[in-house]
Image (tube, rainbow, N blue to C red):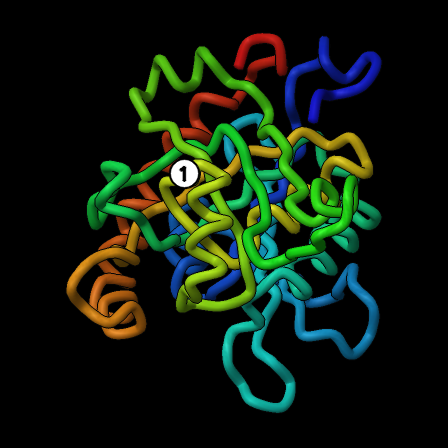
Amino acid sequence: MAPCGEKSQEAISSVVIIIAMQTEAMPLVNKFELKEDQDSVFPEGVPWVRYHGTYKDLHLNLIWPGKDTSLEVDSVGTISASLVTYASIQALKPDLIINAGTAGGFKAKGASIGDVFLISDVAFHDRRIPIPVFDLYGVGQRQAFSTPNLLRELNLKVCKLSTGDSLDMSSQDEKSITANDATIKDMEGAAIAYVADLFKVPALFVKAVTDLVDGDKPTAEEFMENLVAVTAALEQSISQVIDFINGKRFSEL
């Protein structure tokens, strides 16, 4: 996911931040004093919400997929993530996409509650197609945009991310996650990476651990228990990432 052509030598000016849940999104909306778009750039009828504003030299757009129109819960998962990523690229033409959010971690791989990771690689763990080459397509392994200077400056942890559409983990999922060498799992990252890669838009992924998949507590209970506190840690890390990006070219990241 490298920037194409002249863009790689220009200072980054337009950033789209994609976040699946309102609880995760609002601390950043408040931090950067973003305003909700009253005249939506998205198709009529969709629940997707855009917050936007200027921070230092950056035009920031935070995209939240909104609430499901029938059930009034956050529109989490790969389908909504793919759709809003596509629509945001088409409407806003960002230089850079940042997918920020929470994730489940594996203590066996060194993850702890509250850890914030910069993602090096993403892949799917629930698209099993046991046919040659189709199996690789199903896994959909991709690399995030490489940012060695950002990594060094902010001293972030690095890991691989595995994406699937379930909060829990089946035995089949576990085998695939292990094969993906993932330290954390989420429900959006690899889908966003797929769309960003189609349009050659560089993408970063920053994830904070709310629950330990291989821990003692039920995943859903631990997720809800830690969501607010971990979201605060996520907001701090994303703020540092944005500050570092400001005024820099891709080659300086």
The amino acid type found where label 1 is placed reads Ile
Provide residue 177's location: percent of width, then percent of height.
46, 48
Q: Which residue is mark 1?
A: 238
Q: Residue furthest front?
A: 131
Residue under the point 81% across and 50% down: 91
Is 247 placed above or below 162 here? above
Is 196 placed above or below 214 here? above
Element under disc 1 = helix
Residue under the point 55% across and 19% down: 146
Q: Quadrant of the N terminus?
A: top right
- Give the side of residue 188 with respect to residue 157, left or right: right
User: Is 145 in front, or is 10?
Assistant: 145
Q: Residues within 10 Å of mark 1 (few under 14, many from 20)?
A: many
User: Is 158 in front, or is 67?
Assistant: 158
- Give the side of residue 31 with respect to residue 88, left or right: left
Quarter holding residue 81: bottom right
Provide residue 31's location: percent of width, then percent of height.
38, 47
Q: Residue furthest left?
A: 216
Is 25 placed above or below 154 here? below
- Give the side of residue 87 with respect to residue 128, left or right: right
- Give the side of residue 109 with respect to residue 77, left or right: left
Provide residue 77's location: percent of width, then percent of height.
57, 64
User: Is 71 in front, or is 94?
Assistant: 71
**How many labels were placed on the picture?**
1
Residue under the point 27% across and 45% down: 233
Provide residue 108's location: percent of width, then percent of height.
23, 42
